[in-house]
Image (spheres, rainbow, N blue to C red):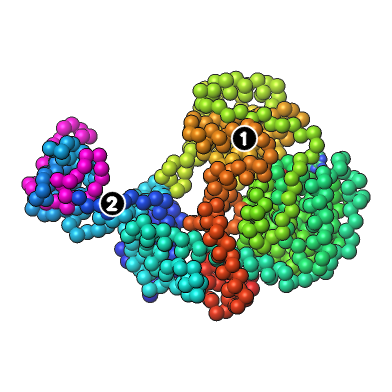
């Protein structure tokens, strides 16, 4: 008996070979398979008799092969199979290009369903390369067909069959995570029905019903999980910190904190002296000085006898934090250690010993900080930087290393406040909405690709003057679930190196490189050994290269504004004037309006508001930029009302059944969504 966690290879009709292909789409279990939702639909439900076929319109025709199909070999690579089909109202001349097998597949006297675009005239109707199915078969014709995101080696047909097999296999297995009372109150359909209709809708109305239900389910589970986390922390207590006077620290800095930084620090200090563990998100634009808030929190933890850990998403970022924070903290008499995955075993052992012996009070590192063999003597504060790179579960893994430690999350993705409060239901939010004084504006231009030569000349000039440049290059194929950015970036870098800048040093980084390799190139760029860095969006994460003065973004219209803003934040970090050039050949009004905003403002929050307004929150929430589970169906601008309803329903459910003892399916699906261990979050 299969269950939803059964490997797809054991599902009837799928097997080893197809399961291998499905893996490329991250489909491993039956649950993954039925949750692989279509990105669009192709309506093939309309039937028509031959007489009524309108040239230019697509329809299904049920017709009989009037004679055996004929094969014409025009030349190599051009083979035509022709067939005349009749249905009693007229005749249809069908041509298949390079599908020789059709000659044997179609038999005179049999009836088939043909789906395709009618062509020709009212006198002679034709169809080219229609989809063909045996009479009565309804897999690819006669209904609304899902269109799935694909990747190389996988066809729509294969996926459609696989999903259908999956749906059949789990007919009796789906337990509903939405309690019946809630479904009743909200008028939401049953789970089995929803899964079937989201893949193979009988009509637009049914599709809408299914979508609404799945969106609600997703938002509901999200709300349940966040509320549980929040409640857990509201109920837990810890010793309040006593020593929170940081006057000497402020005095040691080469600048004074901005008032926004001060406010954030004060909020942090209030949290840690409250007697409840802090759970705070610091949101601040790139360059707003979030690290100083972290430094203050770290120092405060140490002065109260506790250890502090700062986790960054990459080695180079961890190292950068280490370089920046170590002198500040050492000035205050606090020693720091660095812990990354690439450290030699011996050095690593030394750090681990000092951490478990409470000799080292502050450790800065990567995921290495949460390795099972890392033990802390008295971990009291956990700081994560650039939090959208970490999942909730990774945060949880680090906090589990201490006894209810304080948590400080730093994020550079500005999110409008109302939305942030809803989304980060489990965190308090501090916003740093002010940049340190004296920052230069980054001049931003939106141009078309006709400007390439001028841009190259400009880059040359900047580099001659001692600067460096980023070029961001992405390729997003409509159909690809996994776009091949790597190819685009490496090829572009090669062209630039050989044909445009043979005398300069051009390098390339992309997301599919090994982290070590990537860090090596980033480090070389930071050291000034590379003039032009061609990259996919991996540089988005806050690496500091003050010498970089130009950011060029190819196909800028493909990025969200907030993402562009992040990218732009990579330059303008030093004393030299910096520039951002956004290249786009998309002349649509929306695209132009969006890029224009970039040229007009440098305020990340304003940009986020505009982005949300112009194209919805897909940017924040569609891609995993927030550390929360990614939402498969919900879109939070359109579904804001549903989000509120879902939150209300979640609150009511937890009121009645705080530990979800009576709702095990809800509990289990929520954990799955957050990717939580069964043991965390009790
Ligand atoms: P982010 O918020 O992007 O992480 P950082 O903390 O890296 O920003 O700070 C960016 C730069 O600004 C650093 O070089 C830091 O030393 C400097 N900085 C931070 N706070 C101030 C301040 N109040 N006045 C002047 N410079 C500051
Ligand atoms: Mg930072």
Q: Residue at x 52, y 31 (%)?
A: 584
Q: Residue at x 41, y 58 (%)?
A: 208
Label 1 Cα crowd, 10 Å radius (few <14 / some 14-19 / many 20+): many
How far across and how far down the image is residue 554, in percent? 54, 32
Question: Mark 2 CB in 8 Å range of ligand 2?
Answer: no
Q: Position of residue 675 (x, y in %)?
A: 56, 63
| Extreme residue toward the bottom, this view | 662
- Tag 2's secondary structure? loop
For the question of whether residue 513 can be seen, the reply is no
Say few, some or many: other residues with alpha carbon within 10 Å of mark 2 (under 14 / 14 to 19 / 20 or more).
Answer: some
Say which residue appears at 58% left-offset and 43% top-offset: 611
Q: Nearer the viewer, residue 607 or 375?
A: 607
Is the CB atom of the residue marked by disc 1 within 8 angstroms of ligand 1's nearest atom?
no
- Residue at the spot 37% in from the left edge and 63% down from the top edge: 196
**Decide: marks 2, 1 in contact (CB < 8 A)?**
no
Look at the image and give the residue range highlighted in magenta. 49-78
Task: Check the picture and name the quadrant holding the N terminus.
Answer: bottom left
Left or right: residue 641 versus residue 340 is left
> Which of the 4 image quarters holds residue 580?
top right
Task: Name the residue beneath numbered marker 2.
Answer: 44
Observer-nearest of 427 and 245: 427
Total of numbered circles in the picture? 2
Ligand 1's image quarter is top right
Viewer-nearest residue: 213 or 515: 213
Residue at which label 1 appears: 598
Residue 75 part of the magenta segment: yes
Q: Position of residue 673 (x, y in %)?
A: 54, 63
């Amino acid at each position: 008996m299969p269950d939803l966690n059964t490997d797809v290879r054991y599902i009837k009709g799928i097997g080893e070979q197809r399961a291998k292909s499905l893996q490329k789409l991250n489909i491993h279990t039956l649950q993954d398979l039925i949750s692989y939702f279509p990105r669009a639909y192709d309506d093939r439900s309309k039937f028509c008799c031959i007489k009524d076929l309108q040239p230019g319109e697509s329809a299904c025709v049920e017709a009989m092969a009037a004679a055996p199909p004929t094969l014409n070999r025009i030349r190599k690579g051009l083979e035509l199979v022709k067939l005349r089909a009749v249905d009693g109202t007229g005749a249809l001349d069908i041509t298949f290009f390079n599908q020789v097998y059709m000659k044997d597949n179609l038999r005179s006297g049999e009836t088939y369903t043909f789906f395709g675009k009618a062509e020709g005239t009212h006198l002679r109707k034709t169809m080219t390369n229609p989809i063909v199915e045996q009479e009565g078969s309804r897999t690819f014709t006669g209904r609304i067909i899902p269109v799935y995101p694909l990747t190389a080696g996988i066809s729509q047909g294969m996926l459609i069959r696989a999903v259908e097999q999956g749906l059949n296999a789990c007919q009796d297995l789906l337990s509903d995570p939405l309690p019946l009372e809630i479904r009743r109150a909200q008028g939401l359909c049953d789970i089995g029905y929803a899964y079937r209709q989201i893949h193979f809708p009988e009509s637009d109305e049914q599709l809408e019903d299914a979508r609404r239900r799945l969106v609600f389910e997703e938002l509901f589970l999200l709300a349940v999980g966040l509320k549980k986390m929040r409640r857990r922390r509201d109920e837990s207590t810890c010793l309040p910190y006593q020593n929170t006077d940081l006057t000497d620290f402020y005095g040691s800095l080469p600048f004074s904190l901005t008032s926004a930084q001060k406010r954030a620090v004060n909020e942090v200090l209030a949290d840690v002296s409250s007697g409840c563990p802090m759970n705070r998100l610091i949101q601040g634009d790139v360059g707003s000085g979030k690290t100083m808030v972290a430094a203050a929190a770290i120092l405060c933890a140490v002065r109260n006898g506790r250890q502090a850990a700062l986790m960054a998403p990459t080695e180079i970022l961890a190292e950068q934090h280490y370089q920046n924070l170590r002198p500040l903290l050492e000035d205050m008499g606090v020693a720091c250690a660095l812990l990354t995955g690439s450290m030699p075993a011996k050095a690593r052992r030394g750090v681990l010993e000092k951490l478990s012996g409470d000799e080292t009070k502050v450790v800065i590192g990567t995921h290495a900080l949460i390795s099972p063999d890392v033990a802390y003597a008295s971990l009291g504060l956990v700081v994560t930087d650039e939090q959208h790179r970490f999942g909730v579960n990774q945060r949880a893994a680090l906090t589990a290393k201490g006894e209810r430690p304080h948590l400080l999350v730093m994020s550079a993705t500005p999110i409008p406040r109302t939305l942030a409060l809803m989304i980060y239901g489990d965190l308090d939010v501090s916003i740093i909405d002010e940049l340190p004084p004296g920052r230069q504006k980054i001049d931003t231009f939106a141009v078309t690709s006709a400007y390439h030569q001028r841009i190259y000349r400009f880059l040359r000039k900047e580099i001659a003057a001692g600067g460096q440049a980023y070029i961001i290059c992405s390729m997003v194929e409509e159909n690809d679930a996994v776009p091949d950015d790597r190819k685009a970036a490496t090829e572009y870098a090669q062209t630039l190196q050989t044909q445009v800048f043979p005398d300069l040093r051009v390098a390339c980084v992309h997301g599919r490189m090994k982290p070590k390799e990537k860090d090596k190139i980033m480090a070389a760029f930071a050291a000034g050994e590379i003039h032009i860095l061609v990259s996919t969006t991996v540089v988005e994460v806050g690496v500091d290269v003050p010498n970089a003065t130009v950011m060029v973004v190819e196909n800028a219209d493909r990025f969200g504004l907030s993402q562009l803003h992040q990218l732009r934040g990579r330059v303008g970090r030093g004393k030299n004037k910096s520039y951002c050039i956004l290249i786009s050949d998309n002349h649509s009004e929306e695209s132009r309006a969006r890029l224009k905003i970039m040229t007009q403002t440098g305020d990340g929050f304003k940009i986020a508001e505009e982005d949300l307004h112009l194209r919805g929150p897909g940017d924040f929430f569609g891609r995993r930029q927030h550390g929360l589970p990614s939402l498969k169906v919900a879109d939070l601008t359109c579904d804001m009302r549903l989000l509120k309803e879902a939150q209300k329903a979640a609150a009511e459910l937890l009121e009645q059944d705080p530990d979800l003892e009576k709702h095990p399916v809800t509990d289990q699906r929520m954990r799955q969504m957050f990717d939580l261990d069964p043991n965390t979050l009790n």
